[in-house]
Image: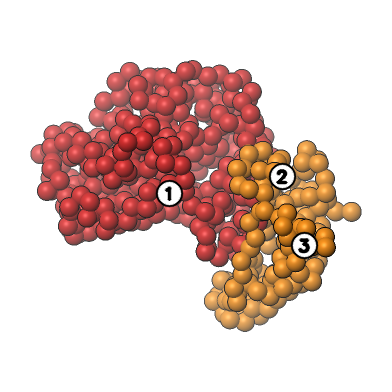
Chain colours: A red, B orange
């Protein structure tokens, strides 16, 4: 059974907060749900599917249902890191297509700035205390960043990718953030600024890394049929893909990222090719995360991402707009920002991007995330969305 | 006495072990490095498990590694707020590929961080960090 145009995103809301010392994560979710449902023209009484990733304040689906006074007939707490919400979009489309729920609420909040360490795992290498891999990694000082850094180092070694090329991604993303009044950092930066920022873990600099912010958001989905009568133009799910990579029992290949599989699935399931995609929302935990996903998604060949991202191609007014909200690199990153990929892709496909709206006409967008940690273990989730 | 001092001084996280991994850590205490090979399908695996994850056979055999390999990839870590590591900055984290064919995470020691390169031949060096725990580090091959 194909999921093509069976379900649609009908309401979205990105909470504007980047620092919320006076709010609980539950409150941020409730506020986001209220606005996303209003965006759709629905109410909380319509929601019978609840999708969240736990974590980020240790919100389990039962505790969240309790707080929101929901009695969902279908819940999914898939958590494989920041890409989980892209997976939730796929799972919600499947559940809606199968008749297991009618109105799905995907939601997220975390407040790591105002509540340091909230929702942060203990393993360092993307593992939690008690995971079997942790005793073989944690004694050696893994960090989130050094996992990505080792992957970047290998990509540079194999393909000649440069720090300047990675910096292009951060520079473009900051340009987009400068057009987003809610973005955490809005002052323009240059390639030189990125290269002059301090090295966190070779070869990644401070400005190759995502920001840390508080935040949250919500996405409402329903069947294509019901979507037609709602407030906004439906943004259809055309298809999805999900995959994982890890130590492979000692046989890992860091250049073969999970997105290679999720991309193959999503193109096979939709019948589309990279040429059919008009813009991309790509999880930008680090600059290297974007570069390698763009290659895996087939927008350029593996190893050629460095040259491909250069020259302004990824700007909102360029030929392939990317991360038009300013991304995790400049706008917001409460720890797992996959939900914002769905939200901004929807806004762009609706033409609601305001000053950062893509200049080219848009019919399709790809949202693709890497959760967990490149270099240790990670999960990819990819969806293709369309406004027609 | 040096051990007592080290025990007090050592602040980095230590591995915990269970019945699946105990032989590995008992071996490192003897300054021996082991991987596993499946007697049924030949799959070589790391980290150690009670079953082969190539075929789920219980017939996994401990195989002593020669302790030689090369650096698959690495990074010089300049920021880590975790106690023990923040005092050791910058330090090198690497995936090392053993000659037995499996990769493991480790630290590269006994050389300057800027000398570390992908593909560099390395050899195991056992770090007795506490009286109970010996970690597996690597250094440039001599
Ligand atoms: Zn086997």
Q: Residue at x 72, y 57 (%)?
A: B8
Q: Image point 65% across, 60% down: which residue?
A: B14
Instruction: Give me the chain letter of mark 2.
Output: B
Pointer 1 local density, CA inside 10 Å: few below 14, some 14–19, many at least 20: some
Question: In which quadrant of the rendered image does the C terminus of chain B lie?
Answer: bottom right
- Residue B56 visible in the picture: yes
Spatial separation of the CA atoms under disc 1 and disc 3: 36 Å
Q: Is residue B84 above or below residue A159?
A: below
Q: Please identify the quadrant where the N terminus of chain B is shown.
A: bottom right
Q: Which mark is residue A4?
A: none
Which residue: 73% across, 54% down? B9
Q: Is mark 2 within 8 Å of ligand 1?
A: no
Q: Going from the N terminus, do you reach mark 2 or mark 3 first?
A: 3
Percent x, y for residue A231? Answer: 13, 34
Q: CA distance from mark 2 to mark 1?
A: 26 Å
Q: Position of residue A216 (x, y in %)?
A: 33, 39
Left or right: where A102 falls relative to A285: left
Q: Quadrant of residue A206?
A: top right
Helix, strand or loop status at disc 1: loop
Q: Is residue A86 above or below residue B54?
A: above
Residue matched to label 2: B88
Q: CA distance from mark 2 to mark 3?
A: 20 Å
In the rendered image, residue A51, in percent from the top left (x then y), is placed at 28, 52
Chain letter behind tag 3:
B
Q: Return the residue at label 3.
A: B4
Q: Which residue is mark 1?
A: A119
In the image shown, does A216 or A112 lie closer to the viewer?
A: A112
Let me know if marks 2 and 1 both belong to one chain: no
Report the residue at 36% width, 35% height from top: A21
For the residue pair A292 and A163, the one nearer the viewer reads as A163
Number of residues whose C-alpha sits closer than 10 Å to that of mark 2, classed few (under 14), some (14–19) or many (20 or more): some
Whether tag 2 and tag 1 are in contact, CB under 8 A, the answer is: no
């Amino acid at each position: 059974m194909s999921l093509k145009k069976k379900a649609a995103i009908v309401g979205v809301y990105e909470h504007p907060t980047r620092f919320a010392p006076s709010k609980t994560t539950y409150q941020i979710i409730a506020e986001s749900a209220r606005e996303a449902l209003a965006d759709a023209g629905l109410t909380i009484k319509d929601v019978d599917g609840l999708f969240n990733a736990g974590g980020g304040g240790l919100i389990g689906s039962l505790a969240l249902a309790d707080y929101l006074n929901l009695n969902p007939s279908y819940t999914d707490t898939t958590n494989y890191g920041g890409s989980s919400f892209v997976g939730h979009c796929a799972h919600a489309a499947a559940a809606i297509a199968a008749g297991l729920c009618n109105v799905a609420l995907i939601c997220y909040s975390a407040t790591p700035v105002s509540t340091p360490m909230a929702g942060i795992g203990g393993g360092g290498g993307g593992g939690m205390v008690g995971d079997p891999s942790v005793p073989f990694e944690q004694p050696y000082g893994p960090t989130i960043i050094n996992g990505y850094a080792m992957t970047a180092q290998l990509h540079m070694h194999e393909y000649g990718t440069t720090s300047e090329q990675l910096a292009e991604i951060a520079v473009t993303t900051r340009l987009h953030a400068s057009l987003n009044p809610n973005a955490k950092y809005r002052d323009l930066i240059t390639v030189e600024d990125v290269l002059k920022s301090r090295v966190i873990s070779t070869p990644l600099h401070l400005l190759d890394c995502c920001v840390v912010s508080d935040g949250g958001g919500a996405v409402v989905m329903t069947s294509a049929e019901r979507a037609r009568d709602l407030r906004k133009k439906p943004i259809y799910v055309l298809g999805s893909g999900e995959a994982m990579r890890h130590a492979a029992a000692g046989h890992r290949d860091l250049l073969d990222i999970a997105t290679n599989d999720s991309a193959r699935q999503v193109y096979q399931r939709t019948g589309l090719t990279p040429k059919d995609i008009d813009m991309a929302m790509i999880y930008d935990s680090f600059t290297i995360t974007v570069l390698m996903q763009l290659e895996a998604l087939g927008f350029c060949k593996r190893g050629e991402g460095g040259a491909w991202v250069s020259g302004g191609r990824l700007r909102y007014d360029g030929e392939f707009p990317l991360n038009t909200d300013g991304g995790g690199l400049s706008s917001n990153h409460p720890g797992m920002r996959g939900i914002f990929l769905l939200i901004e892709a929807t806004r762009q496909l609706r033409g609601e991007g305001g000053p950062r709206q893509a200049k080219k006409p848009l019919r399709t967008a790809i949202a693709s995330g890497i959760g967990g940690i490149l270099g240790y273990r990670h999960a990819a989730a990819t969806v293709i969305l369309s406004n027609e | 006495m040096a051990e007592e001092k080290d025990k007090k001084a050592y602040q980095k996280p230590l591995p915990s072990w269970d019945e699946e991994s105990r032989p590995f850590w008992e071996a490192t205490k003897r300054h021996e490095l082991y991987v596993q090979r499946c007697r049924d399908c030949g799959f070589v695996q790391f980290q150690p498990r009670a079953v082969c994850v190539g075929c789920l056979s219980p017939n996994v055999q401990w195989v002593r590694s020669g302790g030689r390999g090369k650096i698959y990839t690495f990074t010089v870590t300049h920021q880590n707020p975790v106690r023990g590591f923040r005092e050791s900055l910058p330090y090198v984290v690497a995936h090392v590929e053993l000659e037995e064919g499996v990769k493991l995470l480790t630290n590269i020691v006994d050389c300057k961080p800027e000398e570390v390169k992908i593909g560099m031949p390395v050899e195991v060096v056992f770090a007795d960090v506490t009286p109970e725990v010996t970690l597996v580090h690597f250094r440039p091959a001599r």
